[in-house]
Amino acid sequence: MSKTVPLAGVIGHPIAHSKSPRLHGGWLTDLGLRGHYIPMDVNPDDLATVLAALPKAGFKGVNVTLPLKEAALRLAKRATDRAARIGAANTLTFLPEGGFLADCTDGVGFVENLRSGCPGWSAASGPAAVFGGGGAARAVLEALIADGATEIRLTNRTRARADALADLFGGVVRVIDWKDAAQAAEGAATLVNTTSLGMAGQPPFDIPLEQAASDALATDIVYTPLETPFLKTACAAGFRTVDGLGMLIHQAIPGFEAWFGARPQITDATRARLLAP
């Protein structure tokens, strides 16, 4: 390693809530690597200026969170195919010639979390039901299709957003009206919640799930709380469940490896760090 201490970080607005510094900092300690991972609150109006300055200060790259993901992609010198399909970036790597490569690893994190939490799972095993059509749903749909899904039922409170995603991802995605959302679960092998329903201050998640396949796998992209109302509903119906914390962990690996030159391992201690008060 060079004498320069590599720097990376996460940018967003706000950013104080992010668990990424704890995650990456723990990996640096585990691997005995020099380096620092720093949270930075960046106003959207200052994004271009900040991204141009960071490599001059020794930064190898940054993670990007809300509300900067789409703007970061537009500013990229190069972008991966999956970032272009999703329309957002969460992992930026600064290039030696200037500018940065934009990637979106949210979908990778989503799929790897399910594979790790439920060995043998595959998106090709049967229909998938995706609840919610926001930005996170884009990454989920892209990842499910890349993993072999042949039928995805998408339902969202605003029909127009779901229709736009179906147009983007093609015939694999079939939109179901929100009033008929229970139909999305019928015979589904994979159940995915990308909504905030059931969380504090939000309406309850009251969509019946019982008609899913008997061995269905249910997952939520939210990890606070670890067992969300959606996962409680799925567990009560007898389905396998995987919480959303692993998605955060797995999506971080490509960036860490690119910036610090080593691939981190996921252990019980990794989860414990993130769950600690």
Image (tube, rainbow, N blue to C red):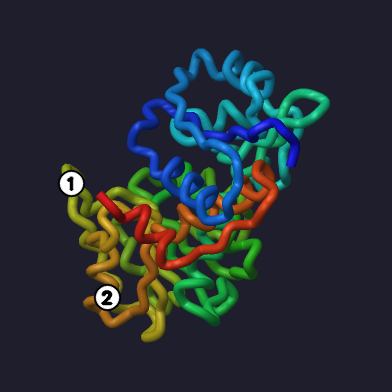
Q: Quadrant of the N terminus?
A: top right
**Residue under the image location 51 percent in, 80 percent down:** 119
Q: Amino acid at mark 2?
A: Cys
Label at residue 235: 2
Q: Quadrant of residue 218?
A: bottom left
Local SS, label 2? helix
Depicted 160 relative to depicted 169: above or below: above
> In front here: 120 or 184?
120
Label at residue 208: none
Proximity of marks 1 and 2: CB atoms separated by less than 8 Å: no
Local SS, label 1? loop
Left or right of 52: which side holds 15? left
Q: Amino acid at mark 1?
A: Ala
**Residue under the image location 58 percent in, 38 percent down:** 35
> In front here: 29 or 67?
29
**Percent position of residue 24, x then y:** 50, 46
> Can residue 151 be seen at all in this image of the molecule?
yes
Circle 2 crowding by C-alpha within 10 Å: few under 14, some 14–19, many from 20: some
Left or right of 100: which side holds 64? left
**Residue under the image location 35 percent in, 32 percent down:** 16
> In front here: 35 or 194?
35
Depicted 96 relative to depicted 233: above or below: above
**Percent position of residue 136, x then y:** 46, 47
Label at residue 200: 1
For marks 1 and 2 on the same chain, the one whose residue lies earlier in the sequence? 1
The Cα atoms of the two marked residues, 1 and 2, are separated by: 20 Å
